[in-house]
Amino acid sequence: MNLPPLIQTFVLHFGEMGSRWGINRTVGQIYALLYLSDQPLNADQIVESLGFSRSNVAMGLKELASMNLVMLKHKPDDRKDYFDTHEDIWDIVRNLVEARRKREVEPTLSMLRSIILEQPVTDVEKHAQKKMHEMHDLIEMLTRWYKEMQRLETERLVRFLNMGAKIYDFFQFKNKTDHPIETTSESD
């Protein structure tokens, strides 16, 4: 790897984390390099910086493009393709979440929908179908919430997320006032 230590540390870590987030290590490292770069990079520059094969870089860029995480750029009088990431971290997060929703959540919901429409035969199947229906309803609720959050402009979304702890504290306080702790005296 031909990178300054500060950048190399981030790129290596991002590659390891990427494998936990559903992308392979190579793709994670390519993305991290592009994200930190102050200018769009072409495939040759990525190969040189990371030491990956040209084919691995091409496949990684294709995967990142399919998730709308990189954008193709061109420079005047240069026939090479250059790649850049979104500048706004919120656009990046939105695209990552949407890609995972399409890849992981939608197939699960489709499977659950088809199963809960089937007629259970045994008590065991009825019990299992009830549990699957609960799971379906929870995932549907979270998906609706996600779609609402996707529609918010970034400034409102940030304010909403920052309110999270305050809302939690409010409900904790409300719960305590609705159900005050009863104290008993020793004379009772």
Image (cartoon, helix red, strand yellow):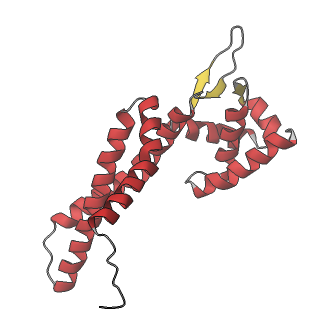
Left or right of residue 77, residue 122 in this image: left
In the rendered view, would you say 121 is above or below 69?
A: below
Left or right of residue 84, residue 111 in this image: left
Residue 85: percent from left, percent from top: 61, 30
Left or right of residue 151, residue 19 in this image: right
Residue 38: percent from left, percent from top: 73, 25
Instruction: Between residue 103 and residue 153, name the one nearer to us.
Output: 153
Residue 24: percent from left, percent from top: 63, 52
> Which residue is located at x 52 percent, y 35 percent?
90
Q: Quadrant of the N terminus?
A: top right
Q: In which quadrant of the rendered view does residue 43 lie?
A: top right
In the rendered view, would you say 170 is above or below 89?
A: below
Determine the residue located farthest toward the top in the rendered image. Answer: 77
> Which residue is located at x 69 percent, y 40 percent?
32
Residue 5: percent from left, percent from top: 86, 43
Determine the residue located farthest toward the bottom in the rendered image. Answer: 187
Left or right of residue 169, residue 135 in this image: left
Instruction: Between residue 76 and residue 17, name the one nearer to us.
Output: 17
Q: Quadrant of the C terminus?
A: bottom left
> Which residue is located at x 32 percent, y 57 percent?
139
Q: In which quadrant of the rendered view does residue 7 lie?
A: top right
In the rendered view, would you say 128 is above or below 101?
A: below
Task: State the count of labels.
Answer: 0
Instruction: Between residue 28 and residue 144, name the one nearer to us.
Output: 144
> Which residue is located at x 59 percent, y 58 percent?
20
